[in-house]
Image: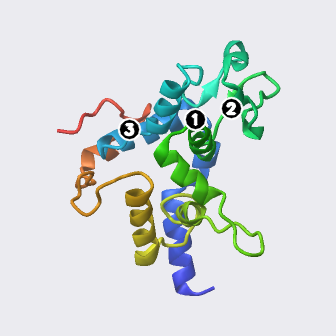
Amino acid sequence: MSENTWKRKLLAFLHDPPEKAYDYSREHGRRAQHYAERIGVNLSEWQDKLAAATGNLFVNGRCNKADVAKLPDVLKSLPFCQPDERDEIKLSLEQLFLALAVLGHDRARGIAADLQATDANGKTKSRWRTATEKRNTSILAHGVSPVGAEGFAAMKQLAAEFLGFDVVCETHPIRPLDPQWLVTEVNSGMDLTQQNT
């Protein structure tokens, strides 16, 4: 292996230490929420939109057993809106977009059209999924591949086109790194009580 490969593996290890794979607790979600709040991102924005569109039958992307029968027929007909073994429905982010699209949400319709796009051979050609895969295999997520300038430009374009971010005027800028965001405590893990000043 080349020296560069080992550097990439070390960076990946530092970003995703082995114990991270065992973090199935609520702490994982709280950690993500903590960082998202620090940079001004609402992780539940699309879940909130679906809750509003369904009269709160979906809460946090989930529809509980008591509310499944109350869902609009257009949602009940979707393959991913079928109850699981616990008679509940839990939607992924892509499924949130697809559900909102059938309910008439304009931005979600654009994303849904992209998610369902295929080439002449019937192979998926979604720009959204391509960007998601690039992010997921990057060192910022679960892999060791850099996103790169081209990948960043594609993600920036998708944020503007699909989500309506005004990236040209930086209406939604990412704040400068604040070392306080990374404060940890020995016994309790991440210190989520720190406030950005």
Q: Is residue 83 above or below residue 162?
A: above
Observer-side mark, 3 or 1, equals: 1
* Lower position in the chain sequence, tag 2 or tag 3: 3
Q: Residue furthest top?
A: 66
**Depth check, front residue: 145 or 43:** 43
Is residue 84 or residue 78 the one in the foreground? 78
Q: Is residue 34 left or right of residue 131?
A: left
Q: Amino acid at mark 3?
A: His
User: The residue tagged with tag 1: helix, strand or loop?
Assistant: loop
Label 3 and label 1: CA atoms lie apart by 31 Å
Measured as percent of width and height from the top left, residue 24 is found at 62, 37
Q: Quadrant of the N terminus?
A: bottom right
Q: Residues within 10 Å of mark 1 (few under 14, many from 20)?
A: some
Judging from the image, what secondary structure is the residue with disc 3 in?
Answer: helix
The residue where tag 3 is placed is 34
Neighbourhood count class around disc 2 (C-alpha, 10 Å): few under 14, some 14–19, many 20 upward: some
Residue wearing tag 2: 75
Q: Earlier in the sequence, mark 2 or mark 1?
A: 2
Mark pair 2, 3: CA separation: 32 Å
In this image, 72 relative to 154: left or right?
Answer: right
Q: Is residue 185 visible?
A: no
From the top left corner, tell me how far across and down residue 129 is, in percent: 60, 61
**Image position, residue 85 (x, y; %):** 82, 26
Question: Where is mark 1, residue-wise?
Answer: 103
Please report contact status of discs 2 and 1: CB closer than 8 Å, yes or no: yes
37 lies above or below 84: below
Who's the residue at 59% across and 32% down the image? 25
Q: Is residue 98 visible?
A: yes
Amino acid type, residue under disc 1 in the picture: Leu
Residue type (three-letter) at the residue carrying disc 2? Leu
- In the picture shown, does residue 28 fall above or below 164? above
